Image (cartoon, rainbow, N blue to C red):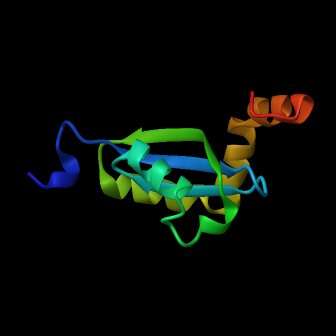
Amino acid sequence: MPSNTTSSMFFYIYILESEKDKELYIGYTNNLKKRIEEHNKGINFSTKFRLPFQLIYFEGCKNMEDAKRREHYLKTTQGRRFLGLRLQEYRRRKKAFGSGS
Protein backbone atom coordinates (compact mmCIF):
# COMPACT_ATOMS: atom_id res chain seq x y z
CA MET A 1 0.00 0.00 0.00
CA PRO A 2 1.50 3.42 -0.93
CA SER A 3 2.54 5.59 2.00
CA ASN A 4 0.20 8.42 1.03
CA THR A 5 -2.87 6.24 1.69
CA THR A 6 -1.93 4.61 5.01
CA SER A 7 -4.69 4.63 7.61
CA SER A 8 -2.70 6.60 10.19
CA MET A 9 -1.60 9.52 7.98
CA PHE A 10 -3.53 12.66 7.17
CA PHE A 11 -2.61 15.44 4.79
CA TYR A 12 -3.61 18.90 5.92
CA ILE A 13 -4.58 21.89 3.84
CA TYR A 14 -3.90 24.95 5.95
CA ILE A 15 -4.41 28.69 5.85
CA LEU A 16 -1.98 30.98 7.62
CA GLU A 17 -2.51 34.68 8.13
CA SER A 18 0.49 36.98 8.26
CA GLU A 19 0.36 39.24 11.30
CA LYS A 20 2.61 41.63 9.38
CA ASP A 21 0.52 42.26 6.25
CA LYS A 22 -2.71 40.32 7.02
CA GLU A 23 -2.33 38.34 3.77
CA LEU A 24 -3.16 34.64 3.63
CA TYR A 25 -0.88 31.75 2.73
CA ILE A 26 -2.41 28.45 1.61
CA GLY A 27 -0.45 25.20 1.70
CA TYR A 28 -0.61 21.49 2.45
CA THR A 29 1.50 19.13 4.54
CA ASN A 30 1.43 15.80 6.32
CA ASN A 31 2.80 17.35 9.54
CA LEU A 32 0.85 20.50 10.37
CA LYS A 33 2.61 21.44 13.62
CA LYS A 34 6.09 21.09 12.08
CA ARG A 35 5.09 23.02 8.95
CA ILE A 36 3.72 25.99 10.91
CA GLU A 37 6.91 26.05 12.98
CA GLU A 38 8.97 26.08 9.75
CA HIS A 39 6.96 29.03 8.41
CA ASN A 40 7.39 30.97 11.65
CA LYS A 41 11.15 30.26 11.74
CA GLY A 42 11.52 31.73 8.24
CA ILE A 43 12.56 28.44 6.63
CA ASN A 44 10.05 28.84 3.78
CA PHE A 45 11.41 31.44 1.31
CA SER A 46 7.98 32.50 0.05
CA THR A 47 6.80 33.47 3.54
CA LYS A 48 9.95 34.42 5.46
CA PHE A 49 9.47 38.17 4.91
CA ARG A 50 5.89 38.13 6.23
CA LEU A 51 6.45 36.71 9.73
CA PRO A 52 4.85 35.91 12.10
CA PHE A 53 1.95 33.70 11.00
CA GLN A 54 -1.15 32.46 12.73
CA LEU A 55 -3.04 29.32 11.72
CA ILE A 56 -6.63 30.34 10.97
CA TYR A 57 -8.03 27.27 9.16
CA PHE A 58 -7.21 23.70 8.24
CA GLU A 59 -8.80 20.64 6.65
CA GLY A 60 -7.64 17.03 6.63
CA CYS A 61 -7.54 14.46 3.82
CA LYS A 62 -6.52 10.80 3.85
CA ASN A 63 -4.92 11.06 0.42
CA MET A 64 -2.12 13.38 -0.72
CA GLU A 65 -3.61 13.90 -4.19
CA ASP A 66 -6.94 15.00 -2.66
CA ALA A 67 -5.08 17.48 -0.44
CA LYS A 68 -3.10 18.88 -3.38
CA ARG A 69 -6.28 19.26 -5.42
CA ARG A 70 -8.02 21.05 -2.51
CA GLU A 71 -5.03 23.37 -2.00
CA HIS A 72 -5.10 24.25 -5.69
CA TYR A 73 -8.85 24.94 -5.54
CA LEU A 74 -8.52 27.23 -2.52
CA LYS A 75 -5.96 29.30 -4.43
CA THR A 76 -8.45 29.98 -7.25
CA THR A 77 -10.91 32.86 -7.33
CA GLN A 78 -13.77 30.51 -6.52
CA GLY A 79 -11.76 28.97 -3.67
CA ARG A 80 -10.98 32.40 -2.23
CA ARG A 81 -14.72 33.17 -2.32
CA PHE A 82 -15.36 29.92 -0.42
CA LEU A 83 -12.80 30.93 2.21
CA GLY A 84 -14.36 34.38 2.51
CA LEU A 85 -17.69 32.78 3.32
CA ARG A 86 -16.20 30.02 5.48
CA LEU A 87 -14.18 32.48 7.57
CA GLN A 88 -16.62 35.39 7.62
CA GLU A 89 -17.23 35.22 11.39
CA TYR A 90 -13.46 35.14 12.02
CA ARG A 91 -13.00 38.19 9.77
CA ARG A 92 -15.98 40.01 11.29
CA ARG A 93 -14.75 39.50 14.85
CA LYS A 94 -11.21 40.42 13.91
CA LYS A 95 -12.42 43.65 12.31
CA ALA A 96 -14.66 44.46 15.28
CA PHE A 97 -12.06 43.73 17.96
CA GLY A 98 -8.86 44.44 16.07
CA SER A 99 -7.49 40.95 16.76
CA GLY A 100 -7.87 37.30 15.80
CA SER A 101 -10.17 36.44 18.71
For residue 101, above or below residue 11: above
The residue depicted at 76 percent of the width and 55 percent of the height is 20
Left or right position of 68 against 39: left
User: Which residue is farthest right?
Assistant: 96
Left or right position of 67 against 87: left
Left or right position of 2 against 19: left
Q: Nearer the viewer, residue 5 or 34?
A: 34
Q: Quadrant of the C terminus?
A: top right
- On the image, the x and y values in percent for residue 38 come to 46, 56
- On the image, the x and y values in percent for residue 15 come to 59, 48
Q: How many marks?
A: 0
Left or right position of 91 against 38: right
For residue 97, above or below residue 9: above
Q: Quadrant of residue 48?
A: bottom right
User: Which residue is farthest bottom?
Assistant: 45
For residue 85, above or below residue 67: above
The residue depicted at 52 percent of the width and 47 percent of the height is 14
The residue depicted at 20 percent of the width and 36 percent of the height is 8
Q: Nearer the viewer, residue 82 or 38?
A: 38
For residue 34, above or below residue 8: below
User: Which residue is farthest left?
Assistant: 1
- On the image, the x and y values in percent for residue 27 come to 51, 57
The residue depicted at 44 percent of the width and 54 percent of the height is 28
- On the image, the x and y values in percent for residue 2 come to 13, 55
